[in-house]
Image (cartoon, rainbow, N blue to C red):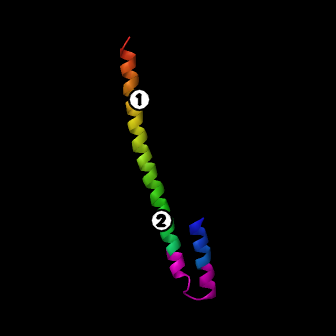
Amino acid sequence: MVPGLSTYRGMYELSIVPGGGAETLASAMGVSIALAAGVVLGAFLAQSILRGARSRARRSAQLLAQDP
């Protein structure tokens, strides 16, 4: 929601004062890129954590199956 508001405000400033909204639009673009990078990093970390948990669960199940 924040990048959308900044984008709207930047476009409004551009329509009122020529060249006035460029800084606001650049800020909105920076926030959008930072959010996208956070999403990608979070997905990467979650995948790594889940992969490790699955492998440990699989090993535990194999060890329990061998103990009759």
Secondary structure, mark 1, is: helix
| Mark 2: amino acid | Ile
Residue annotated with mark 2 = 33
**Secondary structure beneath disc 2?**
helix
Q: Residue at x 53, y 71 (%)?
A: 28
In the shown orientation, is residue 60 left or right of residue 13?
A: left
Q: Nearer the viewer, mark 2 or mark 1?
A: 1
Percent coordinates x, y for residue 45 in the rendering: 41, 48
Looking at the rendered image, the quarter that the C terminus falls into is top left
Residue 51 occupies quadrant: top left
Q: Position of residue 66 (x, y in %)?
A: 36, 15
Which residue range is magenta in the image?
11-26
Residue 24 tag number: none
- Give the overall secondary structure of the magenta segment: helix
Residue 9: x and y, percent? 61, 77
The residue carrying mark 1 is 57
Q: Residue furthest bottom?
A: 18
Q: Residues within 10 Å of mark 2 (few under 14, many from 20)?
A: few
**Residue 34 x/y as whole percent:** 46, 64
- State the CA–CA distance, disc 2 to disc 1: 36 Å
Looking at the image, is 40 positioned above or below residue 33? above
Q: Residue at x 50, y 74 (%)?
A: 27
Query: In the image, is 5 to the left or to the right of 35?
Result: right
Residue at image point 36% right, 14% down: 67
Upstream in sequence: badge 2 or badge 1:
2
